[in-house]
Amino acid sequence: MTLFLALIIVAIGLGIAGVAVEGLFYLLIIGILVFLADLVLGGILIGRWHGARTAR
């Protein structure tokens, strides 16, 4: 969970830097890619967590 939140913060920071600083549009793209990768990672982790339960 800590990794998930850290990646969200990094993605937001890169996105803001990419928009605020002229000529660094690639940082916005990298921030978006990190955010999407984080969503995929979160989905995988949640899927594993729900799949680990066994019915009694």
Image: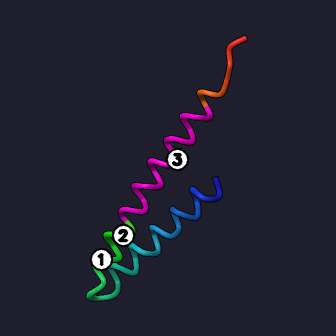
Q: Residue at x 33, y 73 (%)?
A: 28
Q: Which residue is mark 2?
A: 30
Q: How many marks?
A: 3
Q: Residue at x 60, y 59 (%)?
A: 3
Q: Which residue is mark 1?
A: 26
Q: Are marks 2 and 3 in contact (CB under 8 Å)?
A: no
* Dot 3 alpha-carbon crowd within 10 angstroms: few under 14, some 14 to 19, many 20 or more: some
Closer to the chain start, of discs 2 and 3, is 2
Protein image colouring: rainbow
- When the figure is inspected, residue 6 is found, relative to residue 1, above or below; the finding is below
Q: Amino acid at mark 2?
A: Ile
Identify the mark at residue 46; answer none if there is no mark. Answer: none
Q: Main secondary structure of the magenta part?
A: helix
Q: Confirm whether the magenta stretch covers residue 38.
A: yes
User: Is label 2 in a helix, a strand or a loop?
Assistant: helix
Q: Which residue is mark 3?
A: 42
In whole angstroms, how far apart are the C-alphas of marks 1 and 2? 6 Å
Q: Quadrant of the C terminus?
A: top right
In whole angstroms, how far apart are the C-alphas of marks 2 and 3? 18 Å
User: Is label 1 in a helix, a strand or a loop?
Assistant: helix
User: Is label 3 in a helix, a strand or a loop?
Assistant: helix
In whole angstroms, how far apart are the C-alphas of marks 3 and 1? 24 Å
Q: Amino acid at mark 1?
A: Tyr
Q: Are marks 1 and 2 in contact (CB under 8 Å)?
A: yes
Where are the magenta residues, as a range? 32-49
Q: Residue at x 30, y 84 (%)?
A: 24
Q: Is residue 2 left or right of residue 11?
A: right
Q: Amino acid at mark 3?
A: Gly
